[in-house]
Image (cartoon, rainbow, N blue to C red):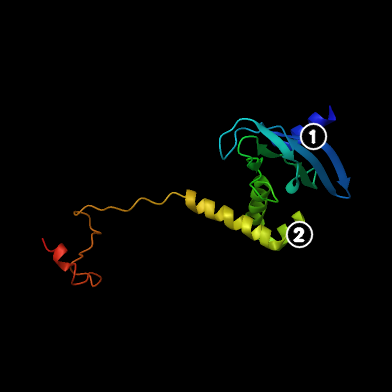
Amino acid sequence: MPGQAINATLDLEGLEVIGVVAFGDLIELVVESRFDAGACRSCGGLAPEPKERPEVLVRDLAISGRPVVLRWRKRRWRCTYCHSSWTEAHPQIPPRARMTLRFKAQLASQAAAQGNFSQVAAQEAVSYDTVARAHKARADLVRQRRSRPAPKWSSPDSADTVDYAASSVVTSSCAHLLSY
């Protein structure tokens, strides 16, 4: 029953907690994935075999105010047909990442709210550069999603029309376009 409570608290679909270790304020959760291997990425073969289980340390959201590190026991698969290998992935943990996406999002939110990257870095026990990169990634995403204002169109009858022929901005090379 306690394992189910920890899995519910972790809330990362497909990862199951198989062990918990506390080091002072730090909580380390040993997790394994329950994904199927799927097909080989090289040949499409459907008979992969397990090759090894490398362990990866990944920082995640705090639990009860205590920092959490996931010790993810990934599976490396080997294709029985073409012998290529691949390591499983998780949507919240990009390849070669040392932090979950949701932890990075939390860093960016705190940095935006507080405006002090050093303070956020100290609170979360990460570097200033980590907070700055998370904030920049979030800002770039917001800029991409921000809708651009519609161009302001005016009718020829409105008072705020511009006489382009009299404008000094118009060069002589395009003046012929304005003469009707």
Q: Residue at x 78, y 47 (%)?
A: 69
Q: Residue at x 53, y 55 (%)?
A: 140
Query: Is residue 180 found left or right of 93 in the rendered image?
Result: left
Image position, residue 75 (x, y; %): 72, 39
Say the numbered circle drawn on residue 169: none
Task: Name the residue nearer the viewer: 108 or 52.
Answer: 52
- The quadrant of the image that shows the N terminus is top right
Check if mark 1's residue and mark 2's residue have beta carbons within 8 Å.
no
Task: Name the residue nearer the viewer: 87 or 169.
Answer: 87
Residue at which label 2 appears: 122
Q: Quadrant of residue 74?
A: top right
Query: Is residue 80 found left or right of 174 in the rendered image?
Result: right
Farthest residue in the left direction? Answer: 180
Image position, residue 25 (x, y; %): 86, 49
Farthest residue in the right direction? Answer: 24
Secondary structure of residue under mark 1: helix
In the displayed structure, would residue 65 be above or below residue 159? above
Q: Residue at x 77, y 56 (%)?
A: 125
Residue at which label 1 appears: 6
In the displayed structure, would residue 126 be above or below residue 70? below
In the displayed structure, would residue 8 be above or below residue 160? above
Amino acid type, label 1:
Ile
